[in-house]
Amino acid sequence: QVQLVESGGGLVQAGGSLRLSCAASGRTFSGSAMGWFRQAPGKEREFVATISRSGAGTLYADSVKGRFTISRDNSKNTLYLQMNSLKPEDTARYYCAARSSISAAIEQALYNYWGQGTQVTVSS
């Protein structure tokens, strides 16, 4: 199995930036497509971004396109989400997930492993 641990969340002012990290263990990270999802209080968890095994293929939700960048370092078994120009509506708990497949995907049901999440709060 793959274990995922998110970090890097916190409180930031609108317009600011945060960089989230997701450390993976289990010796299968390099063979897995990865994704970021988020859930705000009272709302369903939603797709944010996904990246293929090699990092060459990425896909973003329209709400974050142009502001967020997903990347990975397979040598370090780590997934990243660089978040710029943050807005109050970005406030949510952010989760990383792994698919045990090489291709990127936006559907939550296609991901096999999930982290516990890290909180991001953006003040007005």
Image (cartoon, grey):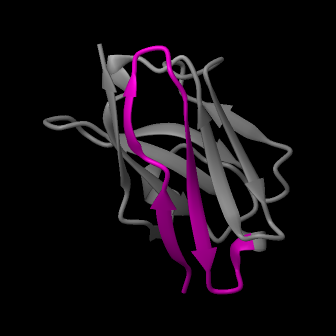
As drawn, 92 above or below 95: above
Which portion, as a residue range, is magenta?
A: 1-29
**3 horizontally vs 32: left or right:** left
In the image, residue 87 lies at what x, y percent? 41, 17
The residue drawn where x is 65% and y is 57% is 79
Q: Is residue 8 magenta?
A: yes
Task: Tell me, yes or no, if residue 52 can be seen here.
Answer: no
The residue drawn where x is 38% and y is 42% is 10
Q: Is residue 77 magenta?
A: no
Quadrant for residue 37, please give it: top left
In the image, residue 63 lies at what x, y percent? 48, 19
Q: In the depicted view, which residue is nearer to us: 121 or 37? A: 121
Quadrant for residue 14, please give it: top left
Q: In the depicted view, which residue is nearer to us: 16 or 94? A: 16
Task: Tell me, yes or no, if residue 58 can be seen here.
Answer: yes
As drawn, 64 above or below 77: above
**119 horizontally vs 101: left or right:** left
Q: Quadrant of the C terminus?
A: top left
Residue most extreme to the left: 42
Q: Quadrant of the N terminus?
A: bottom right
In the image, residue 38 lies at what x, y percent? 38, 42
Q: In the depicted view, which residue is nearer to us: 50 or 87? A: 87
In the image, residue 80 lies at what x, y percent? 64, 50
The residue drawn where x is 81% and y is 50% is 55
As drawn, 82 above or below 34: above
